[in-house]
Image (tube, rainbow, N blue to C red):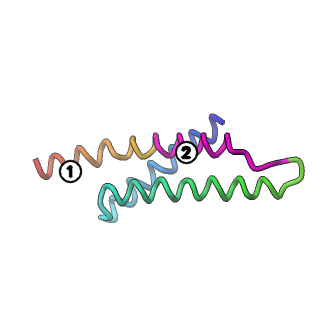
Amino acid sequence: KTLHFLVSMLLSAAIGLGAAVLCLGIWVSLVAAFMLTMLVGTIKELRDMQQEGNHFCLKDLAADAAGATAGCILAAIPLLINYLIKCG
């Protein structure tokens, strides 16, 4: 579960920062990061379900969601600081 958390955190932070660089806006970037990260996690679990001896695991998805949330928070910090500097 730790690996799910860490990969999701890094993925969502990277997507969030990358989307912000494309000038999508802070909130759109963070929502996109969370949604895309969860999509990747869900696809991974669906593929696991198709493998013999493996299964779809809601605990893995919960770890993905927690990691995606943490990654969005990490991405939001520099984005919000940058916004406050520009607008402050």
Disc 1 residue crowd, few under 14, some 14–19, many 20+, Cα 10 Å? few
Mark 1 → mark 2, Cα distance in angstroms: 26 Å
Disc 2 target residue:
65
Please name the residue shown 48% across and 50% down the image: 12
Q: Does 33 sit above or below residue 67? A: below
Q: Do the residues labelled 1 and 2 touch (CB within 8 Å)?
A: no
Span shown in magenta: 54-70
Please name the residue shown 53% across and 41% down the image: 67
In the image: residue 77, left or right of residue 47: left
Disc 1 target residue:
83
Please name the residue shown 79% across and 54% down the image: 49
Q: Position of residue 22 (x, y in %)?
A: 34, 65
Q: Does 25 sit above or below residue 68? A: below
In the image: residue 39, left or right of residue 30: right
7 and 35: which is toward the camera: 35
Q: Position of residue 62 (x, y in %)?
A: 60, 42
Query: Which mark is in front, 1 or 2?
Result: 2
Q: Dot 1 lies on which element?
A: helix
Dominant SS of magenta comes to: helix
Identify the amino acid type marked 2: Ala
